[in-house]
Image (cartoon, grey):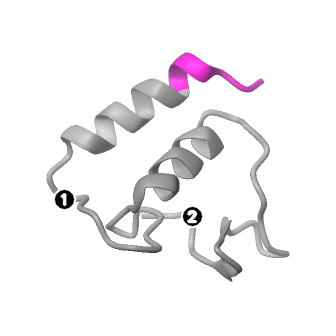
Amino acid sequence: MPDLQRAIDIAMSYCWNETHGYALGGLGSPTFDCSGLIMRSLFEAGFNMPTDQHGNLEHKGTAYLVNC
């Protein structure tokens, strides 16, 4: 079941983890952009997000791996 507080906690943990930085188009492998951080956090918290046929998040028309 989707859990918004869990998504917030996940996003905050990524923000404090110095192995993740900013890069345009990033979904956490290991960098994020602004929307990528939100998408990844919501996905990990159980929200339905756009994925390709392999279960990878789709972002700006390009599929990125969900796994770090």
Is 31 left or right of 59, judged from the image as shown?
A: left
Identity of the residue drawn at 53% across and 30% down: 7
7, above or below 60, in the image: above
Give residue 14's position: percent from left, percent from top.
31, 44
Q: Which residue is mark 2?
A: 66
Question: Which quarter of the picture shows residue 64?
Answer: bottom right
Q: Is residue 35 magenta?
A: no
Secondary element at tag 1: loop
Label 1, label 2: how many angstroms apart (C-alpha)? 16 Å
39, above or below 19, in the image: above
Give residue 31's position: percent from left, percent from top.
33, 66
Question: Which quarter of the picture shows residue 55?
Answer: bottom right
Secondary element at tag 2: loop
Most distant residue in the top direction = 5
Give 29 or 50, whichever is nearer the viewer.
50
Identity of the residue drawn at 51% across and 54% down: 35
Is 46 left or right of 10, judged from the image as shown?
A: right
Tag 2: amino acid: Val
Counting other residues with Cα less than 10 Å from the Cα at mark 1, is it few (<14), some (14-19), or many (20 or more)?
Answer: few
Question: Which quarter of the picture shows residue 60?
Answer: bottom right
> Start and end of the magenta stretch?
1-6
Q: Which residue is mark 1?
A: 19
Tag 1: amino acid: Thr
Quarter of the rendering occupied by the C terminus: bottom left
